[in-house]
Every structure is written in structure tokens, then in C-alpha cells.
Amino acid sequence: MTVSSHPRQKPRQLSPAHDWWRQASVYQIYPRSFHDSNGDGLGDLPGITAKVPYLRKLGIDAVWLSPFYPSALADGGYDVDDYRNVDPRLGTLADFDEMTAALHEAGIKLIVDIVPNHSSDRHEWFREALASPAGSPARDRYIFRDGLGPDGSEPPSDWQSIFGGSAWERITEPDGTPGQWYLHLFAKEQPDFNWDNQEVREDFLTTLRFWADRGVDGFRVDVAHGLTKHLPETLPAEIEMPGMASEHGQHLFWDRDEVHDIYAQWRQVFNEYDPPRMAVAEAWVHPSRRARYASPEGLGQAFNFDLLTADFDAADFRSSITRNLAEADATGASSTWVFSNHDVVRHPTRYGLSAAPVPEAAAETETGTPMAGGAHDGKAWLLAGAPEHELDRDLGLARAKAATLLMLALPGSAYLYQGEELGLHEVTDIPDGQRQDPAFFRNPGVDIGRDGCRVPLPWDADHTAFGFSETGAHLPQPQWFSKVAAELQERNPRSTLNLYRKALWLRQILQGPEELQWIEEDDPQVLHFARPQGWHSVTNFGDKPVPLPAGLVLLSSGVLPQDGTLRPATTVWMTR
Ligand code: NOJ
């Protein structure tokens, strides 16, 4: 056995009050699917407040709240009508304050989603733009262009939106004639802001202060790499553009260097507060360019989706971990880890399907453009390409639990997605007529979209809508939810919920400096690392039992036999 170290290169003085986020466990709440308090079938903020005891018992450090702003839900709330208000279906600002106070009272921080790349087409500024003439200051807040062709009836370029179809939409001018086109990199209900416009910049500073003043502890920045755009007079064809995940920041709208001027300004706002507000970037960029988003002069932390996109494979996991720890060292940020969120197929299902062949169409998208927008990276093609019977649910869940335990032992922040603590699989059989995701509507027959991971949670097996609501759920819940409801799992000491609870509590106790040492095992399918407090994590990625290293077992993601072996798809935590 040999040991290779990954100590921090530049140890710095950390302060628990300021640096709480560096190794936090952050639980993502997709509010419309979490818990409904008023029986309208949509989860809401009082529903979250009611579940604070559950969150406290889970042992998380922070909640990341996906958009709760007024929205027509053309993209699950990522189409924001008003950045400084609460969707009336989800509650009021007073409910928001109550929820924040309840979370804080329970020792849980609050991170809110902020969506600066685009507003909704119902935002007052966009309505004003439609009512104003071409070239007006109101239009300048968005990206309008004349169409091509003699009557301007062709879009200004052939660019495709992330959700499929043209990235341009034509408007009707105030006088009723067909008019200019606006850019929407996502759905047509999500017009892109023009970040060269000073009013846009100022308004977001006001929004950040609005929520920070209300006690919000941090921000998750949606499409952080998309804000600044350089659009020449003559727009190149899509095929002429450099790769979207370009290493050199040459793309016309993804990951341009100028975007960091915005975040430097945001950082000044964050630092006006004590403790400074934190931020985490959703930036689907080339790994070599992620560091700037995570720098202390910028947002401070950035998601890496490397483990999320990796197969359940020891070598893949090890190389992503090593790379990301080195990256974090270089910037002074802490690493981030995530397996599931509201955009991707839940990880038990991904791991249960991983033997399925990659369909041809999907193989193209995997290496093509979707990395830039992120929303298509959930391997939804796995579901389109592999019918339900090819899913090995038990294997998928065993691997997911093993992977999660490994992740929770890593230095840095762990981001968890609601329902993963129940071991939920993706819901794969939502009827087409009940789907909501624009990715489904804009790619008929190709992409089933992201609704399968957004189905309202099962709280109680014996109640209407499995305890999510008094009435029903806005997306259909499958019958198998009755076997995985939270209340059942509470009572079963071997449930996934209780595994998460034990792991999250132990993590809080064992967490030390952000350092990791690899311990080399003979079998390449085994990943073994140690943290400074003598905390070891050992994962068997292979398909045969392996000898369990010596030590005292603290927790195991699966059954631990008496014969001194570690079963396949299992992680143990030990002290030595
Ligand atoms: C990323 C979000 O996570 C996703 O849900 C959304 O569709 C896009 N950004 C557009 O806002």
C-alpha cells in the first residue's frame, strides 16, 4: 500500500463565520415539487417552512432554493417575471421571511437561485420593449435584431436554442406589423438580457442587495457563463462559431472574459455584508476556464459537473477528484461535488442504466454543443434509448449510495438534490400530455426532458399525493412512491434516508482541513482515501468482493458481510 497526498498548496486562515460554505452540505429544493401547504398541487414556501424539522434532522448545512419568483413556468421558474418578489402561488415576501427565519433558527443557511442571463417574456422590461420602437432604450435592455431577407422574415442567424429550434423569435411591432427578432438562448419565453446595458447591470445589483438584505446567505448563479455577448453586425453561421466549450474564450456568447467584470462588481456587493454573501456559478465551461468563476475576486465557487457526468468507474472518479482538488488549490476556492439536480436523470437511474448502449443521436449531443447550456446534460437519452426493463434499480441504487458516501467524504461542498436522500429513481413513465419541460416540447421524439426528476416528493405513503399535498401533484407520482415515502424510511434504520442522515451528521463531526490522501490499494477498482482526522473512505467500484482494509467501520452504504470483505458497489467509512 502506498500513499499519495493532496494537501492544500496554500493553507489559509479560515473563519467559520465567513467560510461556512467551503465544506457545506447543500440541499437543493425545487420549491414547486417539495411540499404543498395549501392544497393547490404546487409546492410552496410555507410548505418548506413546515419541513424545516425534517431538514434539520437530515443534517444539512444549507438549502439552495431554485427559483420561487413569479413566473409562467415556461422553464420551471427559470423564466422570471419579477426578480424581487415571490410567485403568489408559492407565497408572499412575508412567507419568504418566515421560511428564512425558520431555516436560520435551525442552523441552516439559505442560498437562492438568481437568473441573470434572461428574464421571462412577461417581465415588465420585456413588455416595455415590445411596446417601444426599434432602437429605443427599452429594446436595448434585450438583444433585438432586424431579420434577414427582403422583408426581414428570416431570423438574423441560424443559431439553435439550447432547448431546440431557432434561438431567435420574431415579434409583432406595436403597429401590428411583423417586426424585429429577439435572441433567446433557451426557450422563446426567456429573452436574453443585453449586459452591455448599464440599467441591466444596476438592476441586478439592486436585486442582489434586496435578497441579501432579507438575510439570504448566498446565490446560485444560473448560466453564469452566458451573460456577456459579442454580436458583430454580420452574425456568423452556427457552424462557423468556435466550439462552445472553447478553451480560449472566443465564443460569441459563452464564457467570454468580460463576464468576469460583472462578477467582480457583484463580489463588491457580497462583501458589503458581514459575513460576506457567497455565490456559486453554474458555468458549463472548459475545465481550464472554470477557475475564474470560482476565484475570490469573482463568485467564489463554481460547480464542477465532472462526477455527475462520469460513469461509475474508479479511474474516472479518481481523475476528476484529483483534477478538481488541484483546481480548487489554484484559486483558493473549495471544490464542489454533485450527482443529481433538477436538470439531470437521478443518479440511481443513471447508474442502473449505464450498461445500455448510447443511441447514435445521443452520442452526437454528448460531445457536441449541449455542455454550453447545461440543461441537456442529464443523459436523458439513456431513458429514450433504454426501456424500463433494462434498468437495474437495485444496482443503480447501490452504486448511487456508494458514490454519495464517497462524495460526502471529499473535501469541499457537497450539493444534494431533494429526494436523493430517499433513494428516488427517475420517474420514467410520465405521459406526454402531462410533461412540462420545454426541452421535451422543442425536441419531439428525441429528448424526454427533465420532468422525471422533478416529480413532487413522497412524504407519506398513506396520504393523498403521498403526503405532498392535500389534493394532488402537478406532475404524476408513480405507485412505487408508496414504498419509498419519507415517513416509512424514518422508521427503517437501514433506509436510504437514515444512511444520508448518519452520513451528513458524521461528516459534520469528522470534517477537518480541506485535504485528502490517496491510499493505493492493489485492486484498481478500489478507491481509498483518508482525510486528516483519520477518516477513511473506501469504495469498491468493481463487480467482485475485495478485502476490507483494517480499521473501525463507521458507516457502510450497503450490507457489510462478516467475512472481512467489501461487496461490489459499496463504500465504507472507517477510522484508523
Ligand atoms: C440552468 C438551469 O439549471 C435550468 O433548469 C434552466 O433551464 C437553464 N439554466 C435556463 O435558465
Image (spheres, rainbow, N blue to C red):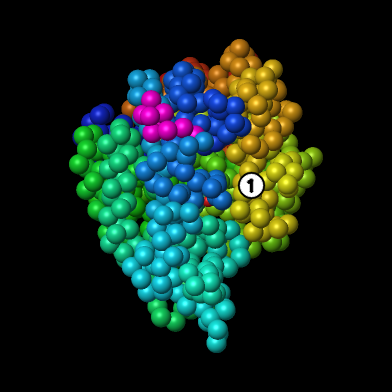
The quarter of the picture where residue 155 lies is bottom right
The residue lying toward the viewer, choosing from 13 and 315, is 13
Q: Residue at x 55, y 32 (%)?
A: 43
* Residue 8 visible, this orientation: no
Span shown in magenta: 90-98
Horizontal side of residue 542 vs 325, given as left or right:
right
- Residue 324, image x, y percentages: 41, 46
The residue lying toward the viewer, choosing from 14 and 83, is 83
- Residue 302, image x, y percentages: 39, 47
The residue lying toward the viewer, choosing from 6 and 243, is 243
In this rendering, the count of numbered labels is: 1
User: Vertical placement of 103 versus 176: above or below?
Assistant: above
Q: In the picture, which quadrant includes the C terminus?
A: top left
- Residue 172, image x, y percentages: 53, 70
The residue lying toward the viewer, choosing from 22 and 317, is 22
Tag 1: amino acid? Gln
Q: Residue at x 55, y 84 (%)?
A: 151
**Residue indicated by mark 1:** 436
Name the dominant secondary structure of the magenta segment.
helix
The quarter of the picture where residue 255 lies is bottom left
* Residue 204 visible, this orientation: yes
The quarter of the picture where residue 322 lies is top left
User: Vertical placement of 219 versus 535: above or below?
Assistant: below
Q: Secondary structure at mark 1?
A: loop
